[in-house]
Amino acid sequence: MDKKSKKFMISFILSFFFLSLFNFSLEFNVSAAVPPVCSDDVKAVQAIDDDLITIQCSSKDQWAAIRSNATYSNVNGNFVNYSNTGGYTKARRDFDSMPGRVTVNTSSTMVKDTGEGLHLTLYRSTGTNTNPWSLQYPRSLISGTYDKIRYYEGSVIPIEP
């Protein structure tokens, strides 16, 4: 090996040594900006880290995912009724998964205002044999209709009269 080749080889090795000392990386870290995908899994939208800004699904998208896990019951006036199991625990988990700010918090009622100006209400139903916890959310502000999901305790939805 001639003197020029040795000099090049030594400088090449020393460059990699110094680069490793300063933690330089030859790889680029590029994050692709893609829109979020709202799924049926209501836990899919969550903060990954306190320093990161996350984009959440709209309240309408999140409500559609919650409602898709309930069973259609009937229409009663301005209410489209659904049933689900899991009682208060499941109702509260679904309530907490919706984006927005809690504006009312009492022992029997919670209200969350969404970014779209809609109100999600968690409350104890009355007038039924089992008095399940319910979530109520507007289907349409124009028509004045609402979706209501009753969350029954246990794993079986009882037949209401």
Image (cartoon, grey):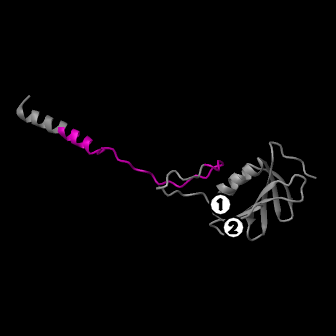
Q: Main secondary structure of the magenta part?
A: loop
Whether residues under marks 2 and 1 lie with C-beta atoms below 8 angstroms apart, the answer is: yes
Q: Which residue is mark 2?
A: 118
State the residue at coordinates (54%, 53%): 47
From this view, report whether residue 67 is shown above or below residue 26: below
Magenta span of residues: 14-43
Residue occupying image coordinates x 64% and y 67% = 116
Q: Is residue 147 left or right of residue 63?
A: right
Image disc number at residue 119: none
Q: On the picture, is 151 further left or further right than 116?
A: right
Q: Which residue is mark 1?
A: 59
Quadrant location of the N terminus?
Answer: top left
Q: Compared to 117, does 30 lie above or below?
A: above
Q: Locate residue 95, reporting x and y percent.
A: 69, 56
User: For residue 114, what is the image quadrant?
Assistant: bottom right
Relative to 103, 155 lies left or right: right
Above or below for 118 versus 50: below
Is 129 positioned to the left or the right of 143 in the image? right
| Residue 30 placement (x, y as % from top left) | 40, 50
The three-letter code of the residue at mark 2 reads: Leu
Quick one: 107 or 127, which is closer to the camera?
107
From this viewpoint, which residue is outermost toward the front?
Answer: 107
